[in-house]
Amino acid sequence: MITSPAALEALDLEQARTAYRGLSYHDALARFTALWRYAREINPEIGANWRDDVEASVAVGRALNGLPPRT
């Protein structure tokens, strides 16, 4: 059993590097597309309100960059 969060993260990173080492851009994109389609099958509403999801992040970004709030 792994009890150290740092050790678990290192193990996860090493596994990901090993598993995806030979993956081409095309293959990675195909895998992402398949996962996105599967996520939409499970929850058809996923991503439908993406503007609402990022609204707070955009507001913070505007404030940090000295831009006025959106009207």
Image (cartoon, rainbow, N blue to C red):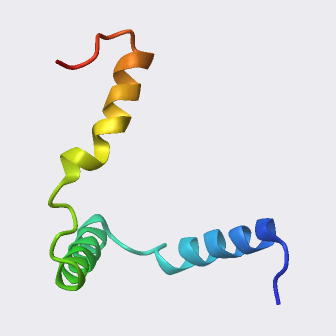
Which residue appears at 77% of the width and 69% of the height?
A: 5
Image quadrant assignment for residue 71: top left
Which residue appears at 20% of the width and 61% of the height?
A: 47
Which residue appears at 46% of the width and 75% of the height?
A: 20
Above or below residue 57? Residue 70 is above
Figure quadrant of the N terminus: bottom right
* Percent coordinates x, y for residue 67 in the rendering: 31, 11
* Percent coordinates x, y for residue 34 in the rendering: 22, 80
Between residues 55 and 26, which one lies in front from this camera angle? Answer: 55
In-image side of 10 versus 41 (left or right): right
* Percent coordinates x, y for residue 50 in the rendering: 21, 52
* Percent coordinates x, y for residue 52 in the rendering: 23, 46
Image quadrant assignment for residue 30: bottom left
Between residues 19 and 12, which one lies in front from this camera angle? Answer: 12
Between residues 60 and 37, which one lies in front from this camera angle? Answer: 60
Above or below residue 50? Residue 25 is below
- Counting every numbered tag in the picture gives 0
Image quadrant assignment for residue 6: bottom right
In-image side of 63 versus 42 (left or right): right
Between residues 33 and 45, which one lies in front from this camera angle? Answer: 45
The extreme bottom residue here reads: 1
Above or below residue 62? Residue 4 is below
The extreme front residue here reads: 71
